[in-house]
Image (spheres, grey):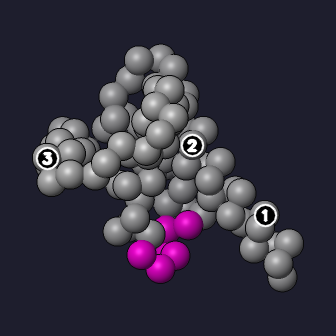
Amino acid sequence: MVAGALANTADFVASTYRPVARVAARGGTLKEAWDAVRAECDPKFGDYAIYEHCLPFNVARAWDEARGIDTPRVWTAARDRDMWDALQG
């Protein structure tokens, strides 16, 4: 069971990061990365507890990493609004 849980976690992380990295590499937008992650992750993980709540923050962090931001940025109210504005666009 532990091996299965670790494999599932690795799949979740890779399935989140891979599409974001592809979009970032071609100069796309956060919204495009969001849509790409939804397409890949929703079918596999959409029924997980708090998936919908956490996904925007997971995508935002993957977006930063894919663009070379190594250290997580401080989450502020302004950053939260900017992220939601970008994802709504």
Kind of residue sitting beneath label 3: Ala
Q: Secondary structure at mark 3?
A: helix
Crowd class of label 2 (few under 14; some 14 to 19; many from 20; radius 10 Å): many
* Residue 28 to residue 86: above or below: above
Report how far apart the C-alphas of labels 3 and 1 lie in the structure. Answer: 36 Å
Name the residue: 43% across, 36% down. Answer: 64
In terms of sequence position, does the residue under pointer 3 or pointer 2 come before the other? Answer: 2
Reading the image, the residue beneath label 2 is 17
In the rendered structure, does residue 77 fall within the stretch colored magenta? Answer: no
Kind of residue sitting beneath label 2: Tyr
Task: Specify start and end residues of the magenta stretch as a single range.
Answer: 45-50
Question: In which quadrant is the N terminus drawn?
Answer: bottom right
Reading the image, the residue beneath label 1 is 7
Reading the image, the residue beneath label 3 is 78
Asked whether residue 50 appears in the rendered view, the answer is yes
Report the side of 88 relative to 19 (left or right). left
Residue 61 percent coordinates (x, y): 44, 46
Name the residue: 57% across, 43% down. Answer: 17
Report how far apart the C-alphas of labels 2 and 1 lie in the structure. Answer: 15 Å
Name the residue: 41% across, 59% down. Answer: 55
Are circles 3 and 1 on residues that touch, CB within 8 Å?
no
Q: Secondary structure at mark 2?
A: helix
- The quarter of the displayed image where residue 32 is located: top left
Kind of residue sitting beneath label 1: Ala
Report the side of 9 relative to 49 (left or right). right
